[in-house]
C-alpha cells in the first residue's frame, strides 16, 4: 500500500490516502513497473481510498472535488455520487454505493483516453457552503493503454500485447542474411528505476524544456511521443541517452557489443546527471528505444534489416566500386550498405494520414540523417513503404531506400568504369523480428515489399536523378557469367571454403585471369585493406562451366578476424584477349566458439533465492588454446562481473532482485589470438515466490 499520513503535520480530518497500488497495478497490467509510484493506464478507472480521522463524509452537505495537474496545466472535476454516464473525453470521479464507510470513502477516477503520458499531481478539495479544505494527495503515473479500443495504441490480440508491451526479453538478429545470429536483449522495464528514467527522459527533452505546457498537451499523441523519444535516445541534439561510435578505441566507455540490456544504460544515464552513455551502435539504440516505448505502453518490437542501404544522396542507388583485382574501394562516402541495421517498429494509429497507414511504424533512433532538424527518423508507416507512398510523414523516402534501393557494382580501372552490374535484390533481402512467444525469427520482408514492387520501384527511379558516375559505366560482359558461393557457415578456427562458378557463354575458348580478394569490414561501412588474395590463370572451353574451389586457412586470417566479424569476398574474372571483366561478391560472418550455460534446477528461478549456474567451454578446435579467460555477468542476477580465471569451467551463484526475464552473459578469450573473443547468453525467468 502507498500511504500518505498528514496526522502529525496538520490538525485536519484527513488521515491518509490508500492508493490501492497492488489492486490497481493488477487491474491496469502495470505490476512491477514501479515501487515508488502508482502506475495506471489512461481511459481505465483506478481506485483510491480517503481515510478520515474523526469525520465521515456527508454527500448532502459536503462536496469532494479532485484536481489533477501537470506543470501549469490543471483540471478540476467533482466526485459524483451517482452512476450517471461520464464524458470519456474528460476526467471523472465516482463513488458507488458501498464505497462510503465510516471514516472513509473510495473514489473511482478515470482519465480521458487521450491523456498525456506523465507523472500527475493529485489534490483533493473538501467543500462545504462555508469553507474549503485542500490536501495534496500525491502523484500517479499515467501510461498509454493498448488494451483499450479507443486508445491510439490499441492492439486487439492479447498475445501481441504480451510480446510487444509486457515482455522484458527480446532478440536482436545480427550478422549477414546467410548466417543470421541471435543476440538476446533484456529490455528491463521491471528493473527498479527504469520507469522513472523513462519519465525523466521526457522531462529533459528540448520540447519540454522549451515549453512545458505545450509538451504536456502533445504527449497524448504516440506519434509525437515517438519522435521526442527517438531523438532523445541518441545524444546528438540534446541531453540524450547514448553516444554512438563505430570505430576506434572504446576505452573511455563500454564497447557496444558488451551491452546486454537497457536497464544498466538507463541507470548510468540518470546517475551521471544525463551525460551520454558511451557507446552505442544501431542495435543498442533500437533496444533502448524499445524499452522506453514498452514502458510507456506503446507496443514495440526490434526489427533487423539485412543489407540495409544508407542512401545519402536520395537517388535510390547505392554505388559500390571495386578494383580490377577485386578489392572494394572507398570512393563514395555518401552511400553505404550496412550488413544489418536495427530499428524499431511501434504500433499506433495515424489519424494524420488515415486508416490505411495505421499499424506498425518505423522509428529509428540511430543518428544518421536529420529529420526536421533533429537526429531522429519516423514514425514512418510500414504500409507507406510497401505502397511506395514516399511523401507520407515521417522520413518515408529514407526508410524506403533502406529496404529497396538498387546496388550498382562497378569495376574501376584508371578512373574509368570498365564493368557495371545492377543488383536489384540485395538491399532489404531479409527483414525480421522475434516471433511471438518463441526465439525463432519472423520474416517481415513482404510487409515492406509488395509483389509488384519492382515495377513501381522502376518508375520511382525515373523520377530521381542519375549519378554522373553511372553515365560512364560500360555494359555487362555478355560472354561470362560468374558467381561466388561460401561453403557452409564459416567458423572461428576453421578453414573458409568457397567456390567460384564460371560459365563461358561464348562459342570460343577463353584464357581467363581469376583475381580473388578478401577484406575485413565493419557491418556498417566499407572494407579495410585486403588480408588475403589469390590470382590464377584459367582456361575454359565454349559453353563450359568451371567450379574453382579455394580455401583460406585459419593461420591466414586469425591475426585479422575476430568472432562474428564480417568479410567481403570478391572475385573478378578477366578475359585476357577481349579485356572483358565480370564481378561477383559475397559477404559472410564468422561463427564464434560455443559457450554453454546451464542453471541447476532449470531456467525458472525464484526471486531473492540463491541458485547455481554452470558455465563451461569445450574446445572443438584442432589446436590447444592457451590462456583461456572465462567471465560471467548478468544484470539483476550478479553484482558486477565474476572475477576471471583460466579454467574452462566455472560455477557461479546468482540471485535475482526483481521478477522478469534476465540474461546471463559469458565471455571467453584466449591468448592464441587477442581478437577471438566469444560471447554466449542464457535467459533466466525470475518468478515471485
Image: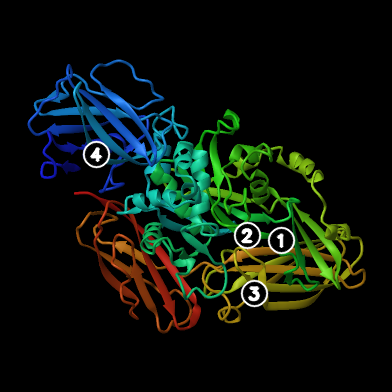
Element carrying mark 2: strand
**Camera-side mark, 3 or 1:** 1
User: Is 185 located above or below residue 460 in the figure?
Assistant: below
Q: Which residue is mark 1?
A: 334
**Camera-side mark, 2 or 3:** 2
**Camera-side mark, 1 or 2:** 1
Other residues around mark 1 within 10 Å, as few (<14) / some (14–19) / many (≥20): few
Other residues around mark 2 within 10 Å, as few (<14) / some (14–19) / many (≥20): many
**Camera-side mark, 4 or 2:** 4
Q: Which residue is mark 3?
A: 551
Q: CA distance from mark 1 to mark 4?
A: 56 Å
Residue 184: horizontal and vertical position, in percent? 43, 57
Instruction: Give the mark, 3 or 4, whose residue is nearer the N terminus.
Output: 4
Residue 677: horizontal and vertical position, in percent? 46, 74
Assess whether mark 2 and mark 1 are in contact (beta carbons under 8 angstroms): no
Residue 555: quadrant of the picture: bottom right
Q: Examine the rendering and report whether any part of residue 291 can be seen.
A: no
Assess whether mark 4 and mark 3 are in contact (beta carbons under 8 angstroms): no
Q: CA distance from mark 4 to mark 2?
A: 54 Å
Q: Which residue is mark 4?
A: 136
Instruction: Give the mark, 4 or 2, whose residue is nearer the N terminus.
Output: 4
Instruction: Give the mark, 3 or 1, whose residue is nearer the N terminus.
Output: 1
Residue 144: quadrant of the picture: top left
Assess whether mark 1 and mark 3 are in contact (beta carbons under 8 angstroms): no
Q: CA distance from mark 2 to mark 3?
A: 26 Å
Side of 341 where 12 appears, left or right: left
Q: CA distance from mark 1 to mark 2?
A: 13 Å
Q: Which residue is mark 2?
A: 338
Amino acid at each position: 500500500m502507498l500511504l500518505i499520513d498528514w496526522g502529525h503535520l496538520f490538525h485536519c480530518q484527513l488521515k491518509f490516502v490508500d492508493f490501492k497500488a497492488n489492486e490497481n497495478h493488477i487491474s491496469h497490467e502495470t505490476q512491477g513497473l514501479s515501487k515508488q509510484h502508482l502506475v495506471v493506464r489512461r481511459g481505465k478507472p483506478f481506485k483510491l481510498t480517503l481515510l478520515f480521522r474523526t469525520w465521515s463524509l456527508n454527500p448532502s452537505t459536503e462536496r469532494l472535488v479532485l484536481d489533477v495537474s501537470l506543470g501549469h496545466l490543471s483540471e478540476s472535476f467533482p466526485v459524483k455520487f451517482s452512476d450517471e454516464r461520464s464524458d470519456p473525453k474528460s476526467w471523472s470521479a465516482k463513488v458507488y454505493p458501498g464505497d462510503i464507510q465510516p471514516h472513509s470513502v473510495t473514489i473511482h477516477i478515470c482519465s480521458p483516453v487521450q491523456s498525456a503520458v506523465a507523472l500527475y499531481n493529485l489534490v483533493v478539495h473538501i467543500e462545504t457552503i462555508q469553507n474549503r479544505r485542500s490536501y495534496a494527495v500525491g502523484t500517479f503515473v499515467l501510461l498509454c493503454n493498448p488494451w483499450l479500443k479507443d486508445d491510439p495504441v490499441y492492439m486487439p490480440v492479447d498475445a501481441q500485447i504480451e510480446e510487444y508491451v509486457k515482455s522484458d526479453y527480446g532478440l536482436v538478429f545480427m550478422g549477414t542474411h546467410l548466417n543470421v545470429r541471435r543476440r538476446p536483449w533484456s529490455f528491463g522495464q521491471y528493473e527498479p528505476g527504469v520507469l522513472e528514467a523513462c519519465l525523466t527522459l521526457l522531462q529533459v527533452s528540448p520540447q519540454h524544456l522549451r515549453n512545458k505546457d505545450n509538451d504536456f498537451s502533445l504527449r497524448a499523441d504516440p506519434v509525437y511521443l515517438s519522435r521526442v523519444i527517438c531523438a532523445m535516445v541518441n545524444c546528438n541534439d540534446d541531453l540524450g541517452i547514448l553516444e554512438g561510435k563505430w570505430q576506434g578505441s572504446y576505452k573511455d566507455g563500454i564497447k557496444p557489443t558488451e551491452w546486454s540490456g537497457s536497464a544498466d544504460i538507463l541507470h548510468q544515464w540518470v546517475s551521471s546527471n544525463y551525460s551520454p552513455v558511451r557507446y552505442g551502435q544501431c542495435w543498442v539504440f533500437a533496444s533502448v528505444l524499445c524499452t522506453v516505448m514498452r514502458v510507456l505502453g506503446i507496443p514495440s518490437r526490434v526489427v533487423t534489416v539485412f543489407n540495409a542501404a544508407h542512401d545519402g544522396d536520395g537517388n535510390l542507388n547505392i554505388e559500390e566500386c571495386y578494383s580490377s583485382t577485386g578489392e572494394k574501394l572507398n570512393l563514395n562516402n555518401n552511400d553505404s550498405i550496412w550488413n544489418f541495421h536495427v530499428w524499431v517498429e511501434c504500433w499506433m494509429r495515424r489519424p494524420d494520414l488515415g486508416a490505411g497507414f495505421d499499424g506498425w511504424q518505423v522509428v529509428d533512433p540511430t543518428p544518421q540523417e536529420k529529420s526536421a532538424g533533429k537526429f531522429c527518423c519516423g514514425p514512418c508507416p510500414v504500409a507507406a513503404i510497401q505502397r511506395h507512398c514516399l511523401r507520407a510523414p515521417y522520413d518515408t523516402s529514407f526508410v524506403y531506400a533502406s529496404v529497396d534501393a538498387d546496388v550498382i557494382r562497378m569495376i574501376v580501372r584508371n578512373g574509368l568504369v570498365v564493368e557495371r552490374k545492377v543488383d536489384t535484390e540485395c538491399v532489404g533481402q531479409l527483414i525480421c523480428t522475434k516471433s511471438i512467444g518463441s526465439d525463432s525469427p519472423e520474416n517481415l520482408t513482404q510487409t515492406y515489399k509488395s509483389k509488384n514492387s519492382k515495377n513501381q520501384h522502376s518508375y520511382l527511379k525515373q523520377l530521381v536523378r542519375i549519378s554522373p558516375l553511372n553515365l560512364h559505366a560500360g555494359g555487362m560482359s555478355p560472354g561470362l557469367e560468374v558467381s561466388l558461393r561460401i561453403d557452409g557457415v564459416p567458423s572461428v578456427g576453421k578453414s573458409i571454403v568457397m567456390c567460384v562458378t564460371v560459365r563461358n557463354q561464348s562459342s570460343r575458348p577463353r584464357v581467363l585471369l581469376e583475381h580473388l580478394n578478401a577484406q575485413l569490414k565493419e557491418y556498417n561501412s566499407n572494407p579495410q585493406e585486403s588480408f588475403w588474395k589469390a590470382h590464377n590463370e584459367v582456361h575454359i572451353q565454349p559453353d563450359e562451366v568451371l567450379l574453382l574451389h579455394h580455401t583460406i586457412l585459419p593461420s591466414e586470417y586469425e591475426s585479422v578476424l575476430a568472432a562474428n566479424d564480417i568479410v567481403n569476398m570478391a572475385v573478378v574474372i578477366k578475359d585476357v584477349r577481349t579485356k572483358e571483366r565480370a564481378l561477383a561478391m559475397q559477404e559472410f560472418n564468422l561463427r564464434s566458439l560455443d559457450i554453454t550455460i546451464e542453471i541447476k534446477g532449470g531456467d525458472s528461478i525464484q526471486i531473492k533465492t540463491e541458485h547455481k549456474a554452470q558455465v563451461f567451454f569445450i574446445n572443438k578446435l584442432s589446436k590447444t588454446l592457451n590462456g583461456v579467460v572465462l567471465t560471467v555477468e548478468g544484470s539483476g542476477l550478479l553484482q558486477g562481473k565474476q572475477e576471471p580465471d583460466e579454467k574452462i569451467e566455472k560455477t557461479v551463484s546468482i540471485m535475482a532482485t526483481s521478477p522478469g526475464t534476465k540474461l546471463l552473459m559469458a565471455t571467453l578469450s584466449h591468448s592464441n589470438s587477442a581478437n577471438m573473443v566469444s560471447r554466449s547468453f542464457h535467459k533466466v525467468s525470475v518468478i515471485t515466490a
